[in-house]
Amino acid sequence: MNRKFSIIVFTVIITAILPGSAFAAAFGAPEPVIPAVNIDKDTKEPVVINGDSVEYSETDMTAVADGNVVITYQDAKLTCKKAIFHTDTKEVLAEGDVNLTQGKSYLKGEQMVYNVETKTGTIVDPRVFIEPTYYGAGQKAEKQGENHYYIKYGYVTTCDREKPHYRVRTKQLNVYLNDKVTASNILVLVGDVPVFYFPYLSLPLKDFRSPVAVQAGHDNDWGYYLLTSWKYYLSEKVKGRINIDYRELRDFAYGFSTNYDTDDFGNGVVRFNYFDERHQRSWSTHPADEKDKDLNRYRAQLRHKWQMDPVTDGIVEYNKLSDANVIKDYYLRDFQRDMVNNNYASVIRTDPYYTTSLFVQPRVNRFDSVIEYLPQVQFQTRSLKIGKSNFYYDGQAAAANINKLEPAPVNGVASVNRVDTTNQLSYQSNILGWLGIRPFAGTEQTYYSRDNEGDNTNLIRGNFFTGIDLSTRFYKTFDVKSNAFNMEINNLRHVFSPTVSYYYAHRPTFRPGNLAQFDAVDALDFRNVITPSLENKIQTKRIVGKTMQTVDLARMIVSTDYNFRAGDKRKGRVGDYQFLLESKPYNWMRILSTTSYDQHSSKFKSFTFNIVGDPEYNLDNPDLRGTVYTDITRKKWSWGAGYRWQDEVYSQLEGQLMFNLTEKWKITAYERIDFKRFGSGVDSGKKFINQVAEQEYRISRDLHCWIGDIICNISQDHGYTFMFALRLKAFPEMPFEFQQNYNPPRFGSTLPPG
């Protein structure tokens, strides 16, 4: 007989031999009978039913399971108190504490009808968890496909309580596992109080930024302000945010950002922000002729990336500003970082043997000082080995139309057509098995359509250069194992790496003073320099993450250069001594220090010292901005500090500390002190001594599903700023970058050129 139902043979035999109490006496409590039902004879994976008791009726083609029922098929698992499975329709009627799990997502209720083959069904009074962060409930839920839930008269929230602190209520809620949640005609309630209405909302499940963000505060430049950001989701390929802001001293502002992705032409982001200051200006006491000036201010941005084929990439970046001060007035953090608003387009093609590129950089904002390339075409080879020899060829060629534009209303323009080529031949070998040697020689030829005065045209500048690089490496291992100061030392290795580079460039046929200066190509001049460098490393092995890795306990580089003919005196001169010290005494701590010393004046020129500690962060790429954007219970503490000093320029100390006061409270403090600073701009010529330039204090409170932040910033330039932010714990990162942070340098760096 062709039967789709079978019982584990051993269980059937034992049950037949020792029925009832005899089975229990022999083996203790009865094990669940585990029948396996094949949906189709060709299906390799069966439906498995476990329960305290399972009975099968071949006549009715049903399996009835009772007590601790577990039904599994593929990635779906259904548990309940009682279930009836129909082998012909593949349908299950489940009752009592029903829980349908798929991945980490689940659907709970008291009664459910579910088809294991089509993975569809209906559940009454459902409670839902949608991976990774959403909870929901409703009047009725329908599973309309393998990854699609439909919930009627329900809500969704990130609060896991039976009565959530807030919820998004809707008549129709669609859940697409591993994709998104969509709802229409929704009402946002805090407790039982409605606070917002949306006609439509779509929440991507893989986006951890808050769908709605609100920040309120007060500062001297904006007065009282309210910033809001609303996430929209048209599809996985088109999504973004809408911003609606109000600033007491600057009126309303509106904006949007859209991230898009095309199948064939790349992806990118479009941003536009408009600042309407007409109402604010109408209150002002400006003269009549000033009232219509800069009333409509804006910032427009576009960044697009396109991988045209496996070896060709294109990038376009566009930034249009209404005026030179809009960044300072509305994007203070960008302004403080001196972020450049570039406008360019480039296409780069990378081949195993060469790279070609097309680069265009026009001026978009008339108030900017810009070097225009309209366009520049460049070709550069890799180091190409010549036959089976140890000789290598390197070459590059570039042609460009270049303009140097001064900010309006200055009309000064320097312009030239330039073609530059460099050809180099090198020889790489190893002497005595331990000394690497690489002599090289080459020429650089450059065509200029005119000189810097325009008196001479069609100039050819020629230059010959040569040099040699020497390097070697010695090491010795010491059998030392210790856990002194919890440093986890498993053997020590000292690595000693001296290098010497010599470079000679003959005097070019045209000196830099005869040519307009656009970039490094035009600055080519006579050079006769030797650069020795010495690197020492102390290494050990310790567990990083879950693997044993080599770690640099300490790394020091000392470098300088000697110019055989410096300046017009034609005398040799030793350059500044450069020192770099980097240490990783623990996996959670990094130290980096750099020093520059001028031996002619017998004094230091610059010094920096940075130290970072964070037990839960990758210190190879530290960014303490993440410190304030984490769940309070996830990160216990972190800190970073840096001191920067440059002779007769500045002496500055900056630091940040974050730690948990309790499980519910976290505090973050930032401070920047100028021990000495010379002013710029309107403060040019002024000297500031022992000035607390900026300090910021942030108190964060865990509110179960929310995190509340109170921020106070005190700045010498911008006065007092008070902010309040409320963010969902499930989406801790805010779209507003309003806080100040210590930004350490990138570790693993090398010394600057001498």
Image (tube, grey):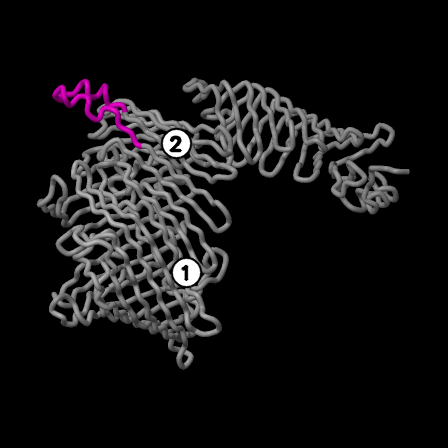
Mark 1 or mark 2: whose residue is earlier in sequence: 2
Q: Quadrant of residue 561?
A: bottom left
Q: Residues within 10 Å of mark 2 (few under 14, many from 20)?
A: many
**How far across and down, in percent of the image, does residue 692 sit?**
17, 43
Q: Which mark is residue 257?
A: 2
Magenta region includes residue 278: yes
Magenta segment includes 481: no
Name which residue type carries label 2.
Ser
Q: Is residue 729 left or right of residue 712?
A: right
Q: Are marks 1 and 2 in contact (CB under 8 Å)?
A: no
**Residue found at the very far bottom of the displayed protein:** 432
Vertical comparison of 567 with 187: above or below: below
Q: Is residue 734 above or below residue 370?
A: above
Outermost residue toward the right?
1
Observer able to see residue 479 = yes
Specify start and end residues of the magenta stretch as a single range.
276-299
Judge depth for marks 1 and 2 and give the one in front: 1
Q: Which mark is residue 381?
A: 1
Query: Which residue: 41% across, 47% down?
Result: 347
Figure quadrant of the N terminus: top right
Q: Amino acid at mark 1?
A: Thr
